[in-house]
Image (cartoon, rainbow, N blue to C red):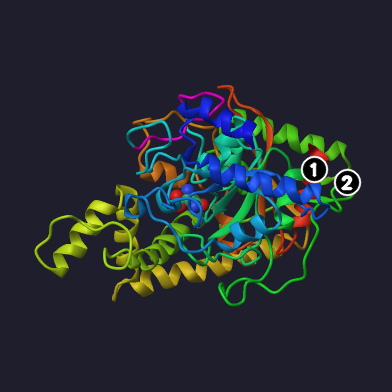
Amino acid sequence: AQHFLQRSQQHRHLGSFVAQDEAVTLTQAQAADARIADGTARPLDGLPLAHKDIFVTQDFPSTAASKMLAGYRSPFNATVVQKLADAGVVTLGKVSCDEFAMGSANENTAIAPLGFDAPAPVRNPWNTAHVPGGSSGGSAAAIAAGLAPAATGTDTGGSIRQPAAFCGITGIKPTYGRVSRHGMIAFASSLDQAGPMARTAEDCALLLTHMVGADPDRDSTSLERSAEDYSQNLNQGIEGLRIGIPKEFFGDGLADDVRHNVEAALKEYEKLGATLVPISLPLTELSIPVYYIIAPAEASSNLSRFDGVKFGFRAREYADLQDMYLKTRSEGFGEEVQRRIMIGTYVLSHGYYDAYYLKALKLRRLIANDFQNAFRECDLIAGPVAPTTAWQIGDDQRDPLTNYLADIFTLPASLAGLPGMSLPAGFGANGLPVGLQLIGNYFAEARLLNAAHRFQ
Ligand code: GLN
């Protein structure tokens, strides 16, 4: 823990950490040491880990990278935070993310990282002029730079997988409902899911084992399912594993260098004994409009709690209650968050609900059905995580729509609630990492981790 604290202090320029407290971290580490010494060690005792600042924590502020929650302290720990603490992890602090997890580049942040006076984007450790991906960009950058051996992340439409790919690390988004969402500051509740990020599938397996589990009193969408030790079957062979290759994931929009690396990784899988099966996920392209209707719709509802009354930011000056709401929300939410509240409110409004929201829900079902058809022919699905490697910070050629379109390969599994992961698969033309995505059927986390581990 001391090593990682010191190293993160030496790498403040990356903008990864938003909160640290040496006394808290070292107290936790000493408690772990004491348990190890007296023979009452817990499974993850002494393992240092950083939490995405979307999880609420008692020991550190919890901001979701929003001015709305600047300095906010939660009276309780998120279930994931508590479960990992109970297993013995030592918290290195909180890491940056996109505001309310909305973004793909960690550029939408309203909180100043440690070492900065003003909000600043996280930098990709492989090339600090480039983004680390998002929204779990602080987690991915911290791991890639060796500031933390592991971190938590959340994935609504790709936020674990895409930053893992951009920073050359490994991350897994479990099946929707496998991990409790209690204490995860909500973005889009029917899609949000927490998962581990680390260097390897082996490390992710170790962490995930201690993150999963039903939380019936606190998250009614968490699923009852027996405990699983994901480390147990990592070394199984993958001979005969059928890997589906969706043709829609290899179309025109895919950059040549990403295609090249992903195809090379698939060849490796063949050498390891897997069989590649051509498949089709015909509605892949529609996952973008479907997601960018459903996610903002849910976000507009979730974010209505930030009204300046109960907690968080409140505008300094206002005329009356209505004006207080207006000024608080206009000043407290960043541009991307406001854009999504507007889209979400619009698609849910009377007269547009049927045309947009209801239609998107129907398509979501069809997208999930396509996966079930595909899984009749294959055991896992593989493809790229993102169409390109990490782009430059502040690239003025990119607008919100460009970023939305770049989510094309991660959104389908999110909409279907399927587990997906990203693992390093070489480097692109600009020297930045390329990720390979593996998607499994419901609860196939063990199979995903096994397949990733064999490759690593
Ligand atoms: N990039 C996607 C978005 O901006 C996904 C974000 C996420 O998974 N939290 O919504």
Q: What residue does disc 2 label?
A: 235
Residue furthest left in the image: 319
Q: Are marks 1 and 2 in contact (CB under 8 Å)?
A: yes
* Residue assigned mark 1: 453
Q: Is residue 191 left or right of residue 176?
A: left
Check disc 2 and report its element: helix, strand or loop. loop
Q: Residue at x 32, y 71 (%)?
A: 352
As drawn, 441 above or below 397: below
| 336 vs 58: above or below | above
Mark 2 close to ligand 1, CB under 8 Å: no
Please name the amino acid that badge 2 sits on. Answer: Asn
Instruction: Please give the label number shown on residue 40.
Output: none
Neighbour tally class for label 2: few under 14, some 14-19, many 20 plus, Cα within 10 Å: few
Quadrant containing the N terminus is top right
Residue at the image position 66 percent from the left and 44 percent from the top: 29
Instruction: Give the image location of residue 284, x and y in percent.
Output: 56, 54
Name the residue at 23% across, 52% down.
Answer: 331
Q: Main secondary structure of the magenta part?
A: loop
The magenta segment is 119-129
Residue 199 sits inside the magenta stretch: no
Q: Position of residue 57 (x, y in %)?
A: 51, 56
Q: Earlier in the sequence, mark 1 or mark 2?
A: 2
Amino acid type of the residue that numbered disc 1 sits on in the rendered structure: His
Quarter assignment of residue 117: top left
Q: In the depicted view, which residue is nearer to us: 215 or 249?
A: 215
Q: Is residue 125 magenta?
A: yes
Q: Secondary structure at mark 1?
A: helix
Within 10 Å of disc 1 (Cα), the crowding (few <14, some 14-19, many 20+) is: many
Q: Position of residue 301 (x, y in %)?
A: 37, 68
Residue 213 in the image, given as x and y percentages of width and height: 69, 67
